[in-house]
Amino acid sequence: MRHRKKRVRELNVGVQKTQNVIRNLITSLIKEWRITTTLKRGKILASEMDKFMADLVKVADRFESEKDIQREIIRIVKKVVFSKPEGQKVVRELFPKVRESGKRSGFTKLVKMESRKWDNAVKVAVILNI
């Protein structure tokens, strides 16, 4: 039976490695602003990135002082993003843009591309849409 199974999240690489793959994809997307990957990984990345950015927005709504907001954002970023320069980029560049725009979702955009030649896998470009 299929009860309580998220089939979208299956990457067939193991539980621990799945989390690392997702975190690597998020870190790369923050670094490059655009990633080319397969359709399945692109869908997973888009949903996880939207959740990540929505968490940052929720934190800003929950706390009143700027110091508390910064502290909580840094905590969330350290939990998700692997490298320090990309984490600083989120805190200094991305979060203020997201906060100004007032968006709650739709932070990524999927654009289908041509198929890969050797295995005919559908490729998509995941673009950070802020």
Image (cartoon, helix red, strand yellow):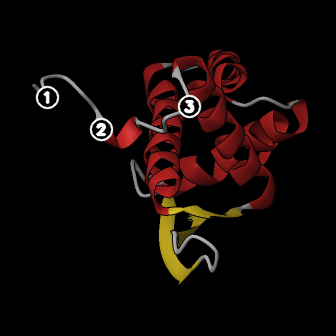
- Residue 15 x %, y %: 51, 20
Q: Can you say whether 81 is above or below 37 in the image?
A: above
Can the viewer see residue 130? no
- Residue 91 falls in image quadrant: top right
Q: Secondary structure at mark 2?
A: helix
For marks 2 and 1, give the CA distance: 9 Å
Mark 1–mark 3 CB contact (< 8 Å) = no
For marks 1 and 3, give the CA distance: 20 Å
Residue annotated with mark 2: 7
- Residue 25 x %, y %: 66, 45
Kind of residue at disc 2: Arg
- Residue 48 x %, y %: 48, 40
Question: Which corner quadrant holds the C terminus?
Answer: bottom right
- Residue 106 falls in image quadrant: bottom left
Q: Secondary structure at mark 3?
A: loop
Residue annotated with mark 1: 2
Q: Residue placed at 52% from the left, 75% from the top?
A: 120
**Residue 77 vs residue 63: left or right?**
right
Along the line of sight, which residue is nearer the eye, 39 or 78?
39
- Residue 113 falls in image quadrant: bottom right
Kind of residue at disc 3: Val
**Residue 116 vs residue 46: left or right?**
right
| Mark 2 / mark 1, whichever is N-terminal | 1
Residue that extends furthest to the bottom in the rendered view of this protein: 114
| Mark 1 / mark 3, whichever is N-terminal | 1
- Residue 5 x %, y %: 24, 27
Along the line of sight, which residue is nearer the eye, 31 or 115?
115
Residue annotated with mark 3: 13
Along the line of sight, which residue is nearer the eye, 68 or 39?
39
On residue 103, which mark appears? none
Q: Secondary structure at mark 1?
A: loop
Mark 2–mark 1 CB contact (< 8 Å) = yes
